[in-house]
Amino acid sequence: MTIVLPVAAQQQTCPVVKIEVEQLPDLNIPRAGHALFYANGELTVAGGHTSGFVPTQTAEYFQDDEWHTMPMTYTHDFGLSVVLKSGKVLLAGGCEQPAGIRQTIHAEIYDPQTHTFRGFGNLQRRRVMASALELDSGQVVIAGNWYAQDGIELFHEHQSDKGDNNDKRSFTYIKDVSAQRSSPYIFRMADGNALILGSNDTRGDALRCTFADRLKGDTLYIPLFETWQPLIIGTHNDAVSIIGDESKGDFSYLLPVQDSTGQVAIARVSGTDITLLPTICPIPMVCQGDSIEYFTNVIVDRQARRAYLLGISSNIHNASEKNPLYVLCIDYGQAFANGGAPITLYYTQPLEVAPDYMPLLTPEGNLLIAGGLAGCSNYTPSGTVRLLRVGREPEKAASSCAWWIWIVLGILIFVLASATLFIYRHRSHRAQSLDIDSEPSQESAPTISDSELMNRISHLMEERKLFLDSELKLGDVATALGTNRNAISSSINVCAGCSFTQFVNNYRINYAKELIRRRPDIKISEVWFASGFATESSFFRTFKAMTGMTPSDWKQNID
């Protein structure tokens, strides 16, 4: 069976656009092979391994512009994770020992309301690189393994009748699979069924298979897989790939596929029907002479009717070089109009860290990456957190507004203009203390070099000691220097090699050490407040990270 791309896809080219990368506060613990999810509205990372390829029994959630560390019951390095409809998170399996050795069987539940983990039982099979997906019934389908036997099992959660939080949770083995897979794709189907497929065998080699397994029923022959095979990827979450409407029984997904030449395309999965999604041009495999390796499943933004597929330079295995990230954007909502879905290839500046897992779609429609591999090695994970700004374009939604909305907009503009004038005349006391004008727009900000801007930032910190303000924000510095947040963040990242938070905390720690030197009798409890830290725990954590000692130990050492 021969399948070709639409004629339109052979005649047009893909636009290429550079995007901004914003660096957010770093994780407290460098990690890779971890889970990344939103739980109770909080950005959370859990498990994985840290420096030296050692599993870490910790998780972190992001609140008040900083990461907070939590203990877990077990380690889950390359384990499975599912955010359940109940709001809790199931975590299970993973590597038992450092360097990715052996599988574990342990499972636990994370409650984001209390920020606690609770172990409750074991998988039916020890697993690493497994996939999981929750069904309408609340049951979770689990399949896949690494260097061990694969098979399908179900997770069940039965609510306690007593309301005492003692819910019954268990795993049941269902059946063997027709092909042994690692990190398989799992898609929901009607009537509580699920489709399981993939091109990774349990040793990481390519698996050519024209069949898919089903939770209920026999294996299914897929004609498309005679020519196109599912893209080989690592641990992922197929719940983010749905484009259908579950409330109407439409379980349609997007699936990345690849042919024997290496060309990537996007397929639409609707129950047992899997066909290519038409695009106005072929998916680009090269950008500015750099070959692209796509490594994730499709991440769908259903509000914008767009989808994303991430790629990395094929030169990534050269640890001595930085490499850009690539984000393929597919406007799937227009797939069957104008010859196919428009696609755009975004790329970033060269980065030191490569993600080893699925990024996360933020509520604003951007992509977030936390942690990953530095130097393309599991022994040197990173704590870097970055935001890829590919978010929704407001003007697209505005174009379909009814005429009466313009009347409302006119009224709003008048009100906002009046409010802006009032605010301008009654500037905040805090802004006056900085002796600054309002922050100019992105377009009006003067263009200066990173090094020149860095000199101005350093001068501001050293002469006016803005770092002593515990509420100092990136926007405050940008406003004080008459530029924008992105320029400040980029300059610090390029010239200092760190995030804004790390840069400011470096000044605070140096100030704290100078206080201790000059005033040997000062209490440590006074130092953190005087140095500009918002909390004592943040001061102790940062001090030890930068000096290798607690403040008390450091004081004794200089004595």
Image (spheres, grey):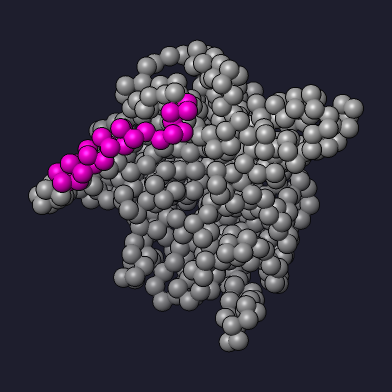
Q: Is residue 428 magenta?
A: yes
Q: Is residue 173 left or right of residue 259?
A: right
The residue at the point 40 percent across, 31 percent down is 19
**In the rendered view, would you say 118 is above or below 304?**
below
Decide which of 81, 418 is in the foreground and name it.
418
- The chief SS type of the magenta part is helix
Q: Quadrant of the C terminus?
A: top right
Q: Is residue 44 magenta?
A: no
Whether residue 512 is visible: yes
The residue at the point 58 percent across, 37 percent down is 470
The quadrant in which residue 528 appears is: top right
The residue at the point 60 percent across, 19 percent down is 462
Relative image position of residue 329 (x, y in whole percent): 36, 41
Relative image position of residue 521 (x, y in whole percent): 83, 32
Whether residue 382 is visible: no
The residue at the point 48 percent across, 38 percent down is 387
Extreme residue toward the left, this view: 403
Decide which of 238, 112 is in the foreground and name it.
112
**In the rendered view, would you say 24 is above or below 254?**
above
**In the rendered view, would you say 68 is above or below 149?**
above
The quadrant in which residue 287 appears is: top left
Q: Is residue 335 left or right of residue 224?
A: left
Relative image position of residue 346 (x, y in whole percent): 39, 33
Q: Bounds of the magenta span?
A: 409-434
